[in-house]
Amino acid sequence: MNFLRGVMGGPSAGPQPSGADTIQKLCDRVASSTLLDDRRDAVRALKSLSKKYRLEVGIQAMEHLIHVLQTDRSDSEIIGYALDTLYNVISNDLEEEEQEENSAKQVDDLGSQFTEIFIKQQENVTLLLTLVEEFDFHVRWPGVKLLTSLLKQQGPQVQQIILVSPMGVSRLMDLLADSREVIRNDGVLLLQQLTKSNAAIQKIVAFENAFERLLDIITEEGNSDGGIVVEDCLLLLQNLLKNNNSNQNFFKEGSYIQRMKPWFEVGDDNCGWSAQKVTNLHLMLQLVRVLVSPTNPPGATSSCQKAMFHCGLLQQLCTILMATGVPADILTETINTVSEVIRGCQTNQDYFASVNAPSNPPRPAIVVLLMSMVNERQPFVLRCAVLYCFQCFLYKNQKGQGEIVSTLLPSTIDGSSVSAGQLLCGGLFSTDSLSNWCAAVALAHALQENATLKEQLLRVQLATSIGNPPVSLLQQCTNILSQGDKIDRRGSKVQTRVGLLMLLCTWLSNCSIAVTHFLHNPANVPFLTGQIAENLGEEEQLVQGLCALLLGISIYYNDNSLENYRKEKLKQLIEKRIGRENFIEKLGFISKHELYSRAAQKPQPSFSSPDHMMFDHEFTKLVKELEGVISKAIYKSSEEDKKEEEVKKTLEQHDNIVTHYKKVIREQDQELEELKQRINTLTSQNEQLQATVTQQVSQIQQHKDQYNLLKVQLGKDTQHHNSHGDAFQMNGIQTEEVSKLKEELEDWKNKHELLQGQLKEKDSVIEKLSSSQLEMGTTEQASQMNKLGGLEHNNELQKELEMLRSQIQLQSAEISKLQMENQKLQVMNATAGPTLGDGGATAARSSELEGRLEQEVKELKTEVKALSEEKESLKQQLDSSSSTVAILQDEKCKLQREVAESKKEQDDLLVLLADQDQKISALKMKLKDLGVPVEDEDDTESGDQGDEDEDGDEEEQDENAVVCYHEN
């Protein structure tokens, strides 16, 4: 224990041992102690000494510490001490004071040496990966830090060991899901080191759902407002995506671009941004640029550009671009980001052209940016960024080029507001050499690969001073070029001339009319030959090379329209004043220049200082294309030139043929589009018809089901069903409806027979009545009564006949309706038959069954015809019955008249009888008064009374009959 107290700094009984001796004793203790507590205390003591005595601990204790990791894994405390000790030995991250103390020892390479010793046995790295899987904080966290330090010291070697280790990368990916932020954040740092410059590990990490987890962490931490954790996640994302086309494609297809939009949401008040927020936003913009970098494959870049437009990311970047209060470095990086998002993408370029700055009145964003580019008070990096944005806006954008050039043409100049063309001209002729160069390069990009605009730009006229006539833009450029050092300028004078020469070379290349205009000025060719022939300093050699290039373009694209400046004469002039070899040597000065090589590397103009801004990336392509052909053209003879002219004419004819065929192909494409539209229309109609057929098939199936149900209810014969089963399956509609028609016809036949029987009964009754009329009466009253009874009976018969007539009409309507349905069903059967057929044998069988069914339908038609004939006969009978009724009505009227006359006569007789009775009574009274005996006639009267009562009853019956007749 005294030994441990000495190590830990406590009081000791004897003299203090040296550091090396103490470390040796601790190592022996670790190796030899059998008690875990003793080994743990010794390892803890080594940890406390490892920072001060790094070299000694590393040399003496590393082997023992690795042995502890292998044997004492059950004790997390000793494992944690051992991992911390190894980290202190291997890591170079020492405190400042310790660095000062150890500066004389030069321990910078100690970490690399100890790492090499540790990874010499690959099992050590595998063991460390296993320990990192432990959930215990005291084991996992030191393991993560140690593995990170190993990757920093010997990255490629450790990466290879982890890559071949089973599930090595997957184990480390689990660190991102750890709920303890310290381990998660250090896990991000570990993955940063793991993914550096190793595409295989980058792909594995990406497909282990790294994008989802990292974006979730960025969102949880507050996006751009987050801390250093957001910065670490963004650096890891850059490692995974930069120069890795597979991961970029996976990032786009996973819809992760859409999740980047909230990163760039800024408020109205953008003052007081923290340094961490500026750093985070800067890294976010760089991450967007990684996805749309010009060095990526064109297809991948284009798809990412479209995705950024559709999700609103480009719109959000333009909002930052036009916002106020944004820090200058963020604004510069935003301009560069917008540049690459719109570069070569027509949709994005059109949107950018429509963006307006929030000013009064609103101005296009392009105009506002060009104002910054030609303003010498703006920072140099910002002006370079604006130039790059303008170049990207015009890249493969003929529509945008035309809009820029149109602002220079006389017919479209608007004096009310500043245009892009006016700003470019102002920058081109200002006294600031950097503005001259930027404006010349910007205008050259407006003419890039566009012969039509090169010709239109020849129409631009400039008013140089009051009272002087206007001069063309081409003439003004050559005037400034020839004046050279005479004009007092701020900045490099060579820079202005280089810019103007690049503009003229771009303008004249592949445009014979512009060459003719250039040569028409008699001062231009002598100026160029004079510049090339002089022996100037190294700084002027670049100008000489560009003059040689411009003169070579004037020869190569010369159409020989000017007699004094034909190709042959210009070649003779070069041979006489300069010399061909000297001319070619001066022409080679361009491609040999250091600044030319830098500009040819990437499209973005990035220069360390304004003096280095000499060449444009697109111009380097033009030089590479023309240098060889101009050299050949200088040495060609007149005969070769003629042959070349013939070849050119042949090529022009070929181009015309190609153009014609392109036109034909375009027309055919339009026709194809129209045919495709027709096909789509017909396809939709076909689908609708198929749906209709499907619906009809379902209806047929429903009819089949209804038929089967009716067959069960009606108890049809099963044998008949079996014999016609195939026919039912082949043509369910026809058999079902025919059976229904048969049943209904049978019902109507029965009803018809019943009505015929009733009609016969009524006819017999009518005949009886007619016979009774012929045999009428012996007595007048009896005949009258019989007539009245016959009339009443005739009325009833007439009503019944009317009812029968209406029923027969209904029957005929039903029969015609059934006939119509039968015809419709036959038509449906004819249309549905082909869709339900299945094979030749089935078709033959169905045709046989259809023959039977047609025969049955013919029989039904004959039966219907017979019924219609019977109906006609019934109509005739009804007509005869109606005539009989009319005769009976006439007879009834006669009888009514006779009854009225007989009643009148009866009334008269009754009156006479009443008078006679009164007279007889009066005579009897007189005889009794005279004493004459009168015979009592009571008996006689009683006998007669019965007769009179009977007569009275008959009279009352007659009266009642008359009343009933009148009521009817």
Image: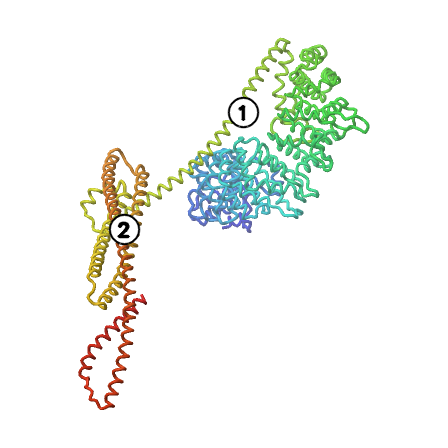
Q: In this view, does 329 lie above or below 565?
A: below
Distance Cα–Cα, label 1 vs label 2: 81 Å
Where disc 2 sits, the SS reads helix
Q: In which quarter of the image is the C terminus?
A: bottom left
- Mark 1, Cα crowd under 10 Å, few <14 / some 14-19 / many 20+, is few
Q: Which colour scheme is used?
A: rainbow
> Which residue type carries mark 2?
Lys
Residue 646 shows up from this direction? yes
Residue 47: x %, y % from top left: 52, 45
**Residue 62, percent from left and from top:** 49, 39
**Mark drawn on residue 375:** none
Relative side of 482 to 345, left or right: right
Is residue 968 found left or right of 472 in the rendered image? left
Circles 1 and 2, Cβ within 8 Å, touching? The answer is no
Element carrying mark 1: helix
Image quadrant assignment for residue 947: bottom left
| Residue 572 vertical placement versus 697 (above, below) | above
Judging depth in this view, the residue of 154 and 361 nearest the camera is 361
Q: Which mark is residue 875?
A: 2
> Viewer-nearest of labels 1 and 2?
2
Q: In this view, does 139 lie to the left or right of 534?
A: left
Q: Say which residue label 1 marks.
A: 663
Q: Where is residue 906 in the image (x, y as percent from the top left)?
A: 27, 72
The answer to which of 843 and 337 lies nearer the viewer is 843
Q: Seen in the image, is 874 located left or right of residue 373?
A: left
Measured along the vertical axis of the image, is residue 822 above or below residue 885?
A: above
Closer to the camera in the image, 252 or 594: 252
Farthest residue to the right: give it: 467
Q: How crowded is mark 2: few (under 14 residues within 10 Å), some or many (20 or more)?
A: some
Mark before the other along the chain sequence, 1 or 2: 1
Q: What residue type is labelled 1?
A: Lys
